[in-house]
Image (cartoon, rainbow, N blue to C red):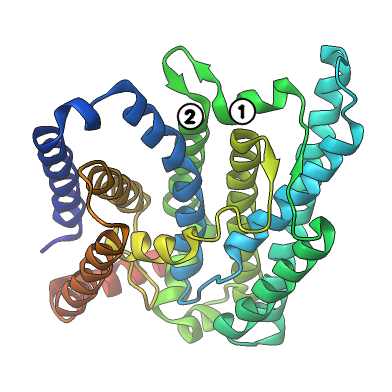
Amino acid sequence: MSRTSKERVLLYVFVGLFALMSLISPNKFLSPGNLQSMATQLPELGLISLGMMVVILTGGIDLSITYTAALSGIVGALVLSAGYTGGAGEAAAGLLIMKALLAILVTAGLCGSLNGFLVSYVGVSPILVTLGTMTLFEGISLWLTKGGAVSGFPEEFQWIGNGYVGFVPVPILIFAVFAVITAILLERTPWGRSVYMFGCNPVATYFSGINTKKTVMWVYLYAALLAAAAAIIMISRYNSAKVDYGSSYLLQSVAIVVLGGTDIAGGYGKVVGTVIAVGIIQVLSSGLNLIGINRFIVDVTMGALLIGVLLLNYFIGKGSLGKGVKKDAQKANTAL
């Protein structure tokens, strides 16, 4: 199976699942309320999944990505709640929102920098680093919130997670913009090509003259930026921030990345595959819940789907796809 046909198969699966759920429960699944619910939930998981994908492309993993989102969201929420007095003018609210967004980005940047520095410059295993920082970020979040929720935001800020541009939810537009940016960065820039090369062969990439430490550092920084975008949407949509917001997205994001065709060992993956996989998981989860399937059965179904995709990727990787990835790495090396 070629790489292009792999994404095409994913698209067929998405369309087939959507049609199946529409036939099984047309009144519920196709209702404006359910479609709106899926459209508002998908971007948060999608942004986390894009961040996870970029890291996995290097052969690493970021177990702290959801708590990077949680911590940065909490810091932004504290800025908002501390400065919001109610009844303030639009100019004052706008300035407060800008301060909160800056606080979120700076916090996420610090989290990503810590991960990137320990992985790329110190040389610690990504799974060990991010397992440690996951606990660290969770602990800081609990300390800041005392385990409770931070709430009380300007109405203007809530528009980010609940507003519309025409009939399109704002979160969907944010996700679409970041998906396009990520695709361009990975497929049209020297940094993106070096990410793929590093995932295929770190040693060869280093000896080809590429600053691999800088490449990996920016990978974790960019993943943290995507986590920050997810945090902004989450705290805006819920009008509050809490430690466990988005924590369930961690394993789902890994499943989505693998389902989307990204090689878990690194070196291959496309944004379009990840985006389609997000849609598949969202449709499957929403559809099964609407027809009354037990939540545990939904989890079992997703787990079985993930195992099946892993096995499929394994057998494909031994054949033409694996050879194609190596050719892509050689082309990228020549281009650089």
Residue drawn 87% across the image and 28% down it: 84
Q: Is residue 336 visible?
A: no
Residue at 86% x, 12% y: name it.
Answer: 89
Question: Residue type at mark 2?
Answer: Leu
Q: Is 303 above or below relative to 15?
A: below
From the viewer's perspective, tell me whether residue 159 is left or right of residue 286: right
Query: Viewed as shown, does residue 296 lie left or right of 318?
Result: right
Residue 85's spot in the image, x, y percent? 90, 25
Q: In what quadrant of the picture does the N terminus appear?
A: bottom left
- Does residue 114 lie above or below 175 as drawn? below
Q: Residues within 10 Å of mark 1 (few under 14, many from 20)?
A: some
Q: CA distance from mark 2 to mark 1?
A: 10 Å
Residue 161: x and y in percent read 58, 31
Q: Is residue 213 left or right of residue 151?
A: left
**Which residue is pictured at 27% across the width and 43% down the height?**
283
Identify which residue, 198 or 102, lies in the foreground. Answer: 102
Along the horizontal axis of the image, is 130 left or right of 298? Answer: right
Q: Which residue is mark 1?
A: 160
**Residue highlighted by disc 2:** 173
> Which one is in front, 9 or 87?
87
Residue 60 position (above or below residue 222) = below
